[in-house]
Amino acid sequence: MGGIFLKKKILILILLALLLLSSCTKPSKFTEPAKKPGVSPPPIPSKISMGEKKEPVLKVYVKQTGKIESMPIEKYITATVAGEIKNDWPMEALKAQAILARSYVLNFVSTKTSKYPGADISTDFEEAQAWNPANINSRIKKAVDETRGEVAVYNNKYIDAWFHSHAAGQTAMAKEGLNYKKPEPPYIKSVKSNDSPDAPADIKHWTVSFTKQEIAEALQKMGLNIKDFKNISIGTKGASGRTINLNFDKTSVNAPDFRIAIGSERLKSTMLDSVNYDGNKLTIKGRGFGHGVGMSQWGAYQMAKQGMKAKDIIMYYFKGLNIVKIW
């Protein structure tokens, strides 16, 4: 009887020892914590071929030559950064521009078709981004190289990586600044923008005039049947202060669309302070440059000068994004 009891006691002690050992051992390498949701990189668009170093190669219609050129995406990005901002800007502003430019291209190829047959994208500013290889220097090359393959994504998709020159103090929602037809993107927000005092005077405040003929041609380009008008005035304004509609007598005309039709380089923004029409000439006073959605480049310039990093700049102007490296 005593022998049986002793054997049971030994067996219990062995079992207790095994349990104690199992609780002290390190977990298996296969029990790693799950990755945070929303950080998986999206696929590279299937229509883009892959070149050396697993880098996508774009078919770019070069407007300056009228030919389609196969171009590694980082080479294209380098020239777009050089076209969009000055090559002597703070490094972190250049890097922020590179990340957004790369995101813009991949979103464009994923969701749109170039107006130039056979091309993935073009150097045509009206279709995509500015492009100026002549302005490339070692600083721009460094900014692109140090952000190689980095893109901004939301919900595992490339974002509409909007940016503009000068926000005049406040960025806009997409519908307000761009007359965006789809639902407001969840990553777009309207924020105060500390646009640099170093910005040129003629984009901080500006005055522009248009003839009645220029106005009529712009309205016709928009497909509007407005034959004549006696008065032009500012209609509704959005939350950022930008004009949403202009009133031509009693007819409401979308201001962002009118800006594009009459020339976005001349009518620099829809942050309008006054509109005066004398029957022959329209004079508009306003502030800022660009549609006002997403990142302000002069805001990024100022933030970089104050020591902020590229990713922090992007996260300030957008919300809920992830910056991921995909090659």
Image (cartoon, grey):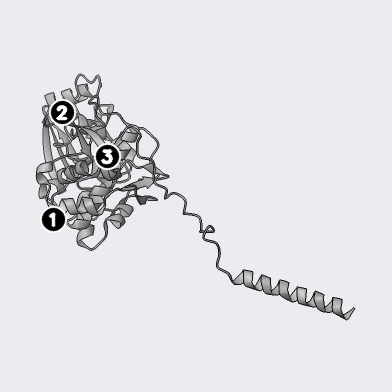
Can residue 232 be seen here? The reply is no
Q: Mark 3 or mark 2, which is nearer to you?
A: 3
- Is tag 3's residue or tag 1's residue first in the polypeptide sequence? 3
Q: Which residue is mark 1?
A: 198
Where disc 3 sits, the SS reads loop
Q: Amino acid at mark 2?
A: Lys
In front: 3, or 108?
3
Q: Which residue is mark 3?
A: 51
Residue 30 image offset from top left, x and y in percent: 53, 57
Instruction: Give neighbour class at mark 2: few <14, some 14-19, many 20+ (Cα, 10 Å).
Output: few
Image-based side of 258 in relation to 111, left or right: left
Tell me how far mark 3 sits from mark 2, CA to CA.
Answer: 20 Å
Residue 52 image offset from top left, x and y in percent: 26, 42
Q: Residue at x 29, y 28 (%)?
A: 113
Q: Amino acid at mark 1?
A: Asp
Q: Residue at x 23, y 58 (%)?
A: 303
In front: 25, or 252?
25
Q: Which residue is mark 2?
A: 67
In the image, residue 191 sits, relative to residue 161, either above or below, namely: below
Instruction: Give neighbour class at mark 1: few <14, some 14-19, many 20+ (Cα, 10 Å).
Output: few
Where disc 2 sits, the SS reads strand
- Is tag 3's residue or tag 2's residue first in the polypeptide sequence? 3
Where disc 1 sits, the SS reads loop
Can residue 294 be seen here? The reply is yes
- Is tag 1's residue or tag 2's residue first in the polypeptide sequence? 2
In the image, residue 11 sits, relative to residue 243, either above or below, namely: below
Q: Are marks 3 and 1 in contact (CB under 8 Å)?
A: no
Q: Mark 3 or mark 1, which is nearer to you?
A: 3
Image-based side of 144 in relation to 8, left or right: left
